[in-house]
Image: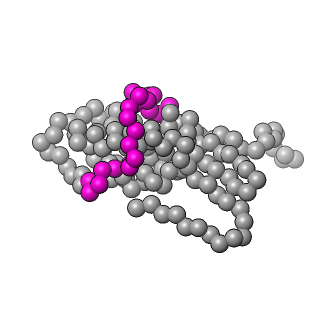
Amino acid sequence: MKEFEMSDLGLLLYYMGIEVDRKIDSIEVKHETYVKKVLKQFAMEDCNSSKYPMEAKLQLKKDVEGSIVDLKEYRRIIECLRHLTHTRPDISYIVGIVSRYMEKPTTLHQQTIKHILRYMKGTTSYGIQLRRGREVEERVGFY
């Protein structure tokens, strides 16, 4: 502050759609408001939720025979989902898979990203929790 003009805005609460919640022994980061905004933007706010980010044994491939969907909308959804992976490692794998088909997405690929959005509808409050302490660490993984 001695060299540059600046002001103290206090503790970080919100940054680029990421909500930061500080507690006594932990910090939680999540995208709850951003997820709701994305669902509304793509007319999925009233959809049924899903328990899983992808169908079991899903194998996507180039769908040569499928009808091509709106490329701009597909890319916009992927861009939103990729931003969500910063606080949602549970969707990282499937978002990486659907990102491969941004050149010629078909209805099969669009159904998959809509499934991801349905999963996001049911898990809007999910995020990352960073705990403080010296007790035995608990490892959580996603598969």
Position of the C terminus by quadrant: bottom left
- Left or right position of 105 against 36: left
Q: Nearer the viewer, residue 59 or 78?
A: 59
Q: Nearer the viewer, residue 81 or 39?
A: 39
Q: Nearer the viewer, residue 73 or 91?
A: 91
Using the rendered image of the protein, determine whether residue 27 is visible from the camera's viewpoint: yes
What colour scheme has been applied to the protein in the rendered image?
one colour
* Residue with the most extreme bottom position: 136
Q: Assess whether residue 51 is covered by the magenta stretch.
A: yes
Q: Is residue 56 above or below residue 138?
A: above
The residue depicted at 53 percent of the width and 36 percent of the height is 34
Name the spot of residue 55 as percent of width and height, x first: 30, 50
The residue depicted at 52 percent of the width and 63 percent of the height is 140
Name the spot of residue 9 as percent of width and height, x first: 78, 39
Q: Is residue 104 above or below residue 73?
A: below
Q: Nearer the viewer, residue 135 or 77?
A: 135
The residue depicted at 20 percent of the width and 49 percent of the height is 62
- The range drawn in magenta is 37-58
- Left or right position of 131 against 30: right
Q: Assess whether residue 38 is covered by the magenta stretch.
A: yes
User: How many circles with numbers are drawn on the protein?
Assistant: 0
Name the spot of residue 118 as percent of width and height, x first: 39, 39
* Residue with the most extreme right position: 2
Q: Main secondary structure of the magenta part?
A: loop
Name the spot of residue 94 as percent of width and height, x first: 36, 52
